[in-house]
Amino acid sequence: MSGSAGGNTRSLRLGSTGLLALLFVTSLIHADTDVPVDHYWDGVLQAYACINITEPLSGWTAHLLFDADIASIEVWDALQTRVSPREYKLTNQHYNEQQEPGSTLCVYFRGHLEVKANNAPAISMYIEGMDGPTSEPVTTTTMQPTTSTTMGPRKTDT
């Protein structure tokens, strides 16, 4: 960016540390699988969440994400934990912990909205470590940009 008269210029450079931070944030992006709602009535939904397995899993944790607040869910093929009104964590049962590439993992569930709505909420699902982030806590660090200033020739009194 050019400055005022005298040839002052300033440049902003992304140092190697900043580049690593950018790559780290990019790696946190995960692919959610949309979950279609089979039935919806009076604030209650039924859905069959299925996701393609792309790598061998010996135990799994999936996350159901909703775009509306959900009071509770009932699920039979996984153990559930409420993370927030819009996210539920599902972990395998003993009989479905082993998943092989090429197979499809499906979990049937019923959800109860906190506030009844005319339409069913949008739902997505991802599996930790396969198509989503791992369960380890995420730490972010804000890096200060590297700034350099180049001064042009100085005027001297003669």
Image (cartoon, rainbow, N blue to C red):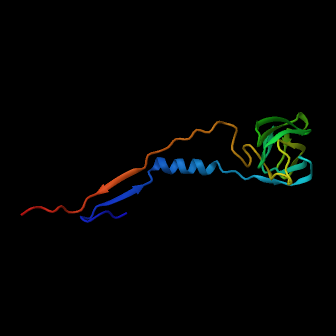
Q: Residue at x 28, y 61 (%)?
A: 8
Residue 96 horizontal/vertical position (percent): 89, 39
Q: Residue at x 43, y 49 (%)?
A: 145
Q: Residue at x 58, y 47 (%)?
A: 24
Residue 64 horizontal/vertical position (percent): 79, 45
Placement of 133 over or under 153, stated as above or below: above
Placement of 128 over or under 13, stated as above or below: above
Residue 32 horizontal/vertical position (percent): 75, 52
Count up the numbered dots: 0
Q: Residue at x 85, y 50 (%)?
A: 117
In the figure, residue 128 lies in which quadrant?
top right
Which quadrant is home to the N terminus? bottom left
Q: Residue furthest left?
A: 158
Which sits in the foreground, 108 or 54? 108
Q: In this view of the protein, can residue 117 be seen by the observer? A: yes
In the displayed structure image, the side of residue 145 where residue 40 appears, left or right: right
In the displayed structure image, the side of residue 88 where residue 46 appears, left or right: right
In the figure, residue 4 lies in which quadrant?
bottom left
Which quadrant is home to the C terminus? bottom left
In the displayed structure image, the side of residue 134 where residue 82 appears, left or right: right
Q: In this view of the protein, can residue 64 be seen by the observer? A: no
Which sits in the foreground, 142 or 87? 87
Residue 75 horizontal/vertical position (percent): 89, 39
